[in-house]
Image: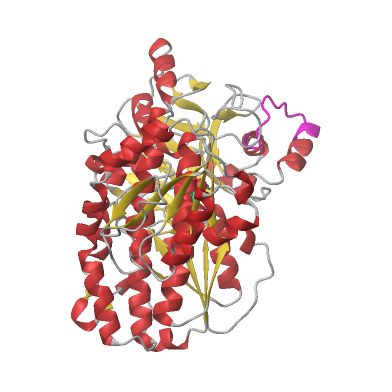
Amino acid sequence: MCGIVGYVGPRDAAPVLLDCLSRLEYRGYDSAGVSVLDGRGVETRKLAGRVAGLRDLLARAPLHAHCGIGHTRWATHGAPTERNAHPHSDCAGTLALVHNGIVENADVLRAQLERTGHRFTTETDTETLAHLIEEARGATLQERVLSALVRVEGTYGLAVISETDPGTVVVARRGSPVLIGVGDGEYVVASDANAVLPLTRSVVYLNDGDIAVIRPEGYRVFDGEAQPQDRSVDDVEWDLETLALGGYPHFMLKEIAEQGHTVQSTLRGRLLPADGTARLNGLNLSPARCARIRRIVIVACGTSWHAGLVGRDVLEQLADVPVSVEYASEYRYRKQLRVPGTLTVAISQSGETADTLEAVRAAKAVGSTVVGIVNVVGSTIAREADGGIYLHAGPEVGVASTKAFTSQLVALLLFGLYLGRARGLSVREGRALAEELARLPDLVTRTLALEPQVRALAEQYADAGNALYLGRGVNFPVALEGALKLKEISYIHAEGYPAAEMKHGPIALIDEHMPVVFVAPRDHVYPKVVSNMQEVKARGGGIIAITSEGNGDLHHVADHQLRVPATSPLVSPILTVLPLQLLAYHIAVLRGCDVDRPRNLAKSVTVE
Ligand code: G6P
């Protein structure tokens, strides 16, 4: 989704901005642009297409300045055209502005601004911001931005330059992240810490309502009342190497392959096998408070929502507490019930998903304590939650989430252990699970060795038009996740279903052209799933079974078997999902799809 960058410092701004923008490409976008402020005024280059195209454009028509802003746009208001690409300008062409988020009252503002003589040249909501700032009163750009934003409803992360304030970038945020990278005599602004890493690892995260002024001699942060604020400078913990392909053809494959390490990182220092529990320092929930929890509501979107569905089984079984799992986008607009003893758990890789963030705020508004299970350190959800568990999986670049999912499951299991032990789970049961978790990095690595088999299978099914993924119990969310991976990156229509529900509809679709993937490790529902396989086989469907090592009774029913190491049922989704990630990946590659940048998708959905 849209990305913002800005630069103030001694270097030539345009190449720095391009470099920063290229580090935001993974978020998904359809057009790109930069504006700089040189001795003559504001100059802009933009186009519909990729950052590489913008680089060519700048090679043909260079810009030289020490201050500028840039943007990658993911179209919401108006088609992805050059005209609608950011930066946008005012009537006089004296300022340039880039924006993430949505101006919800853009139509009203546009009508008002047109009445006072402003001429619009784009279909975007963002252009209203440029004209509002042009119209606003104030001695400095900062004052004019502040006064313009008073009229804005909706969300924004924005960066502005203006001829009136040479060498200055003004940024502001409400609902969309903005941070300042603090270098040695230079500053870089971005919506995502990945973008600033070539220059610095020291970042200042702005709070909602903040506005900041960045000049060559330093930066200053103000709150919505224009009062100066001290914001801490944090260190970004990952480095540039983790953002490189490291010999892999795609980030998705690299991220699938590194899951032995990433699950280990999520576990590191947290597992207490002898006590059968976990140490979760950031959670801010004492055992006494855990014992008082009456229900848990999990809010999330996409893959994180699937992790939440696994989390329901984990928390209900280990901690004996009722759990509901909500699409954050639905939950936030329903009536929120004030139920004493409710704990809300927000799961989000990015920590910036707009719907999940608003669900967190809605839950807090009715008195719920909120725990975040988040990967990106310092992200908005992580900061607004009362406590949380960081995944420590490192940056996830591939749009289709893989390693974040398995780390989310590990974090939920650690949380289940901790909560469970505070609520009656025996030491013996806790130890058994903790020992299983300690083996997990090894089990993941062994499962990933299935790749050659999965690749061969992909060749057989790459031309499929549809696919069905089935599972029961804790395997059902894995089926959903396998189907989501396939449709996201290969554009094959795929559905995940509870295996027994198949009889209530999808069975009508089954014929010899329909591959059906069963997630069927050996667990208490396994015999039932085998019956469901028979139903598919009787109708000619091709069956791929993801089952447990040592399981020898599927030869007569499954066309193909992928066997993952046997483990405890609650841990098994971390293994069974791996061949499904690989299957989606190899099918997409065989179909010639752009795996890391699937069409229309965004890595981090910061608009609702
Ligand atoms: C987007 C991504 C998905 C992700 C979802 C939730 O749709 O493409 O991969 O699962 O957002 O993102 P979050 O960062 O909140 O986990």
Residue 114 counted in the magenta span? yes
Check the image and report above or below for 187 versus 545: above
Q: Residue furthest top?
A: 60
Residue 230, percent from left and from top? 39, 59
**265 or 540: which is nearer to us?**
540
Left or right, residue 477 beside residue 126: left
Q: Quadrant of residue 440?
A: bottom left
Residue 527, percent from left and from top? 43, 66
Check the image and report above or below for 286 versus 492: below
**249 or 227: which is nearer to us?**
249
Left or right, residue 334 beside residue 294: right
Q: Residue furthest right?
A: 115
Check the image and report above or below for 165 versus 527: above
Q: How many marks?
A: 0
Residue 82 counted in the magenta span? no
Q: Main secondary structure of the magenta part?
A: loop
The colour scheme is secondary structure
Res. 486 in view: yes
Q: Quadrant of residue 576?
A: bottom left
Q: Which residues are magenta?
A: 113-126
Residue 113, percent from left and from top? 75, 35
Residue 7, percent from left and from top? 38, 35
Res. 222 in view: no
**234 or 366: which is nearer to us?**
366
